[in-house]
Amino acid sequence: MKKINITTCPLCGGTQLERTLTCVDHYATGEMFHLCRCARCGFLFTQDFPAETEIGRYYETPDYISHTDTRRGAMNRIYHWVRTYMLGRKARLVCRTSYRKEGRLLDIGTGTGYFPQAMLKRGWQVEAVEKSAQARAFAKDHFGLEVKPETALADLPAGSYDVITMWHVMEHLEHLNETWDRLNELLTERGLLIVAVPNCSSFDARRYGAYWAAYDVPRHLWHFTPATMQQFGSKHGFILAERHPMPFDAFYVSILTEKHMRHSMTFLRGLLTGTLAWFSALVKKERSSSMIYVFRKKR
Ligand SMILES: [Zn+2]
């Protein structure tokens, strides 16, 4: 299998990369992957991850709900309830931070299409891109959305989107720096980039160490902190304007982590850690399990 070995830090170009954690793929294969940290800037990433052409099989599991949209089990029911709440919150965030009631939006890694659908209903013009053919078919069947494959990203017109959103997508993309550059090109001068990613310096990440479910190797290639996100934005012509915690993620991630650890009473234990993480993030939002970052283009 073709694996990608990182020899220079994608963020700062540093070459002193230290192995810090060993994580297991609990979703698909049970294989082990190492996480490395750049000694210079602290950026954390999955080492020797499968190349884009081969990573498909690591997504093939009935559990991958963001794509298959199953409603079986308590976990999935909670996930769907939270998603409905979060859709409203995301839509309001887009409108508030862009100072627009409507405009042109590009959603990258759109999954089954719920977010673009919510924005269309609010009067936005929406373009959506998604890698999974199965998820694109779902969006077509349920919402009549014409979601484009990710290859379309290269052909979209530059300087034409008021807002680009990436909800839990950036951590999956092999060509990280190229993607950041492309995002900058695609936005208008006053355009806004909104990115949500897990936070590996969160309360729950520190508590669970290598078991933390949001390391999600090898599907998550990059493990961001508020500091490294700001640095990536700055490197690619963006200024970090706002950060927002996503407190629900701590519950989801903690329950999933407890399940991976094969503890008894996974739901209650996860709920407890999720609650502690919630309070921790109230005191200091940089400790939130996941965060939403709002970037503006530098002028
Ligand atoms: Zn570095």
Image: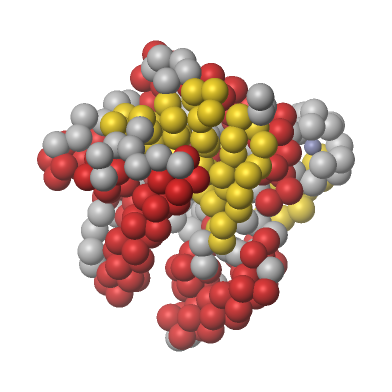
One can see residue 182 in this view: no
Which quadrant would the C terminus be assigned to in this image? top right
Q: How is the image coloured?
A: secondary structure
In this rendering, the answer to whether 211 lies above or below 124 is below
| Of 125 and 42, the residue lying toward us | 125
Q: Position of residue 234 (x, y in %)?
A: 71, 33
Figure quadrant of residue 39: top right
Image mark count: 0
Q: Residue at x 67, y 36 (%)?
A: 239
Figure quadrant of residue 285: bottom right
Q: Residue at x 73, y 48 (%)?
A: 227
Q: Position of residue 251 (x, y in %)?
A: 48, 72
Q: Position of residue 38 (x, y in %)?
A: 80, 41
| Of 44 and 59, the residue lying toward us | 44
In this rendering, the answer to whether 288 lies above or below 172 is below
In this rendering, the answer to whether 245 lies above or below 104 is below
Q: Residue at x 39, y 17 (%)?
A: 156
One can see residue 155 in this view: yes
Q: Position of residue 283 (x, y in %)?
A: 67, 74
Q: Residue at x 50, y 45 (%)?
A: 97
Horizontal side, residue 79 vs residue 22: left or right: left
For ligand 1, the image quadrant comes to top right
